[in-house]
Image: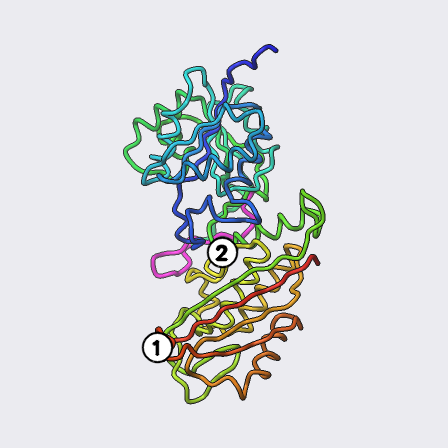
């Protein structure tokens, strides 16, 4: 067999971001979209694109996790892949990727792993423009919203002609020498590589981007990506055959000391001390959410209801559970039943257990919910009446 020629094209996949705004419990590229990470979904498009050296730039310590994703998707291109640690900024991470390029590489694509659903056609359009002689090329989509220029106080200064605007995406393609020269000469951080190259005096052209190539930055972006993946896949069917029912577990703990009334298991408890938390501190509802998301492979409560989601500040069980039910439905799952146990000295559940079950079940679209409660015989923080713990188990079935 004649060996394949060494490629002259490289793709640097930038996956070193911390994902602070996403609040997914891991660096952004390693947060789950479905049963796979954001990075793995991004690599699917990379390896469907023209043959290239692939350099994946990740946070230090996550090289092994990245290689796991690579092995699952690279196929016979595994020998073209390397993984390197990134820097403190996106620009320094791209520089780390450039340093790992082979000598024969003459054109480079830089792609954000956070644009995990970028169609292969976008890669092909960028590569075609480079092949036609472009020095630097980016995919872009028209700006459809009305844009206003505002001052520091938030007052509108002027309207902006959106016909002259476009939203930049990735992969962004460059002649290697131009990108390396611009990277070495940079005296400031730029928001993307096209800005870096333009600042060095080089022309940048655009090709058509794609709406699916949006950047996953916040919780709502993650929800959107998961819904698109679920919509594109046959409902309740996985690569290894029909989906079976799945079980998940969830736990949550909150300390007493919040403001206002106590909310627990979807009920208000007059006269009881409130629990502290970003929302209402309802440990029972939050444990149920975690169990359902775990069963469906959709991450955890921090991914979808983090402190970057102001709409859930102070929200009660109904909002959390209804949103979770919608997430599961979009991913092709239906809630079978939920069981949750409360560990606390207070409040006393015996007289309101059935009421709590009705409220929680209604918020989950009628799925059966059973609630039980116990104490810990004076042991631990719950035994000292410092807070409440809840443990949930959930069953989901194909919709």
Residue 355, quarter of picture:
bottom right
Disc 1: CA contacts within 10 A as few (<14), some (14-19) or many (>=20): some
Q: Which residue is farthest left?
A: 187
Residue range (magenta) = 142-157
Rendered location of residue 16, percent (x, y): 40, 40
Mark 1 lies on a secondary structure that is loop
Q: Position of residue 264 (x, y in %)?
A: 48, 78
Residue 219 is labelled as 2
Q: CA distance from mark 2 to mark 1?
A: 31 Å
Between 176 and 372, which is closer to the camera in this rendering? 372
Residue 120 seen from this side: yes
Tell me what residue is drawn at x 55 percent, y 49 percent: 33
Work out whether residue 118 or residue 39 is closer to the camera in this orientation and state it.
39
The image quadrant where one finds the N terminus is top right
Is label 2 in a helix, a strand or a loop?
A: helix
In the displayed structure image, the side of residue 33 where residue 375 appears, left or right? left
Identify the disc placed on residue 386.
1
Figure check: 8 above or below 119: above
Picture residue at 50% right of the left edge, 23% below the top? 79
Q: Is residue 165 visible?
A: no
Q: Residue 310 at what x, y percent from top left?
A: 44, 65
Q: In this rendering, which labeled residue sits more in front, label 2 or label 1?
A: 1
In reply to whether residue 154 is colored magenta, the answer given is yes
How many numbered callouts? 2
Location of residue 214 with respect to 106 vertically, above or below:
below
Q: How is the image coloured?
A: rainbow
From the viewer's perspective, is residue 243 above or below residue 15? below
Residue at horizontal 53%, vertical 38%? 42
> Is 39 above or below relative to 309?
above
């Amino acid at each position: 067999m004649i060996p394949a020629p060494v490629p002259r094209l490289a793709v640097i996949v930038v996956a070193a971001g911390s994902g602070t705004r996403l609040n997914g419990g891991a660096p952004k590229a390693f947060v789950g979209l479905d049963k796979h990470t954001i990075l793995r979904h991004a690599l699917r498009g990379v390896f469907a694109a023209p043959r290239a050296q692939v350099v994946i730039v990740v946070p230090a310590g996550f090289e092994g996790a990245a290689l796991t994703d690579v092995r699952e998707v690279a196929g016979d291109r595994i020998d073209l892949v390397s993984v390197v640690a990134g820097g403190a900024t996106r620009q320094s991470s791209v520089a780390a990727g450039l340093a790992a390029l082979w000598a024969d590489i003459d054109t480079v694509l830089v792609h954000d792993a956070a644009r995990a659903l970028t169609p292969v056609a976008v890669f092909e359009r960028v590569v075609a423009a480079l092949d036609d002689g472009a020095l630097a090329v980016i995919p872009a989509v028209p700006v459809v919203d009305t844009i206003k220029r505002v001052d520091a106080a938030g007052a509108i200064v002027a309207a902006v002609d959106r016909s002259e605007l476009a939203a930049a995406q990735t992969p962004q393609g460059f002649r290697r020498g131009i990108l390396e020269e611009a990277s070495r000469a940079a005296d400031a951080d730029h928001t993307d590589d096209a800005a870096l190259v333009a600042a060095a005096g080089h022309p940048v052209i655009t090709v058509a981007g794609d709406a699916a190539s949006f950047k996953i930055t916040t919780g709502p972006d993650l929800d959107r990506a998961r819904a698109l993946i679920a919509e594109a896949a046959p409902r309740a069917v996985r690569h290894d055959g029909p989906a079976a029912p799945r079980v998940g577990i969830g736990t949550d703990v909150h300390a007493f000391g919040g403001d206002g009334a106590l909310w627990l298991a979807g009920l208000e408890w007059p006269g009881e001390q409130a629990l502290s938390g970003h929302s209402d501190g309802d440990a029972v509802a939050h444990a149920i959410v975690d169990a359902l998301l775990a069963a469906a492979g959709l991450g955890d409560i921090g991914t979808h209801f983090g402190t970057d989601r102001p709409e859930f500040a102070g929200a009660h069980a109904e909002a959390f559970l209804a949103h979770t039910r919608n997430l599961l439905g979009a991913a092709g799952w239906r809630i079978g039943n939920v069981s949750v146990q409360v560990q606390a000295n207070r409040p006393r559940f015996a007289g309101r257990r059935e009421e709590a079950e009705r409220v929680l079940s209604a918020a989950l679209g009628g799925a059966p919910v059973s609630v039980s409660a116990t104490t810990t015989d004076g042991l631990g923080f719950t035994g000292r009446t410092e807070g409440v713990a809840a443990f949930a188990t959930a069953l989901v079935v194909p919709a």
